[in-house]
Image (cartoon, helix red, strand yellow):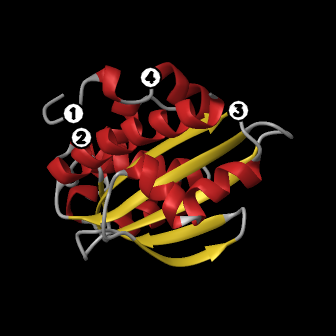
Amino acid sequence: MPNEPKQSSRMSDAAVQTKTGKTWSEWFKLLDKAGAKKMNHKEIVAYLKEHHNPGPWWQQMITVTYEQARGLREKYEKAGGFSANASKTIAAPLAKLYETWSDARQRNRWLGEKGVVLRSTTPEKSMRLAWSDGRSNVLINFYAKGESKSQVAIEHEKLANAAAAKKMKTFWGERLNLLKERLEA
């Protein structure tokens, strides 16, 4: 179908059909018929909820995938702009992982980015950073995965475009790999 991303860049038809009862092409045809190309994101989600109710997570997944397939949304695009996500599970206690983010000296050693400002924090749960570009924000969530294992999940939001999001996704992947190496050494 025109304007659809390659199958390898999204969840498989088999997985979608198992969870929702329809393949991607069936969802796309249904949404095309409903006039979703002229709807905004919230209207498409509301249509899915009212007429098919695949569940809240699937309403979002189907809508975003449809918008991308029909050229209504670029990869990494959200309602408030573009964002990049990354996460990493690290063999380190939650308190130690959190400290590498909350302590500015430690953070500067592995992050390598000047001008980042800690805006808010909930100890060992989450934090929010103002990024050095003065426009974007980084939301960080921390999760315990046992006594000596934890996970960090990042969303870098309000990026200018898809290229900036792709660049930051790569940046965060590299930085989290470095952080993992340091904490697991």
Label 2–label 1 contact, CB within 8 A: yes
Whole-percent x and y of residue 79?
Answer: 32, 68
Please tell me whether mark 3 sits on a helix, a strand or a loop: loop
* Residue drawn at 38 percent across, 59 percent down: 156
Among the two numbered marks 1 and 4 on one chain, the one whose residue lies closer to the N terminus: 1
Compute the Cα span from label 2 to label 1.
Answer: 4 Å
Please tell me whether mark 1 sits on a helix, a strand or a loop: loop
Query: Which residue in the protein does label 4 denote?
Result: 12
Label 4–label 3 contact, CB within 8 A: no
Q: Is residue 97 left or right of residue 127?
A: right
Compute the Cα span from label 4 to label 3.
Answer: 31 Å
* Residue drawn at 74 percent across, 50 percent down: 94
Query: Disc 2 marks which amino acid?
Result: Ala
Label 1, residues with CA under 10 Å away: few <14, some 14-19, many ≥20: some
**Quadrant into which the C terminus falls:** top right
Among the two numbered marks 2 and 1 on one chain, the one whose residue lies closer to the N terminus: 1
Query: Disc 3 marks which amino acid?
Result: Ala
Query: Which residue in the protein does label 3 denote?
Result: 91
Please tell me whether mark 2 sits on a helix, a strand or a loop: helix
Query: Disc 1 marks which amino acid?
Result: Glu
Label 3, residues with CA under 10 Å away: few <14, some 14-19, many ≥20: some
| Residue furthest bottom in the image | 119
Whole-percent x and y of residue 2?
Answer: 13, 32
Closer to viewer: mark 3 or mark 2: 3
* Res 4 label: 1
Query: Disc 4 marks which amino acid?
Result: Ser
Among the two numbered marks 3 and 1 on one chain, the one whose residue lies closer to the N terminus: 1
Q: Is residue 164 left or right of residue 31?
A: left
Closer to viewer: mark 4 or mark 3: 3
**Quadrant into which the N terminus falls:** top left
Compute the Cα span from label 3 to label 1.
Answer: 39 Å
Query: Which residue in the protein does label 2 denote?
Result: 69
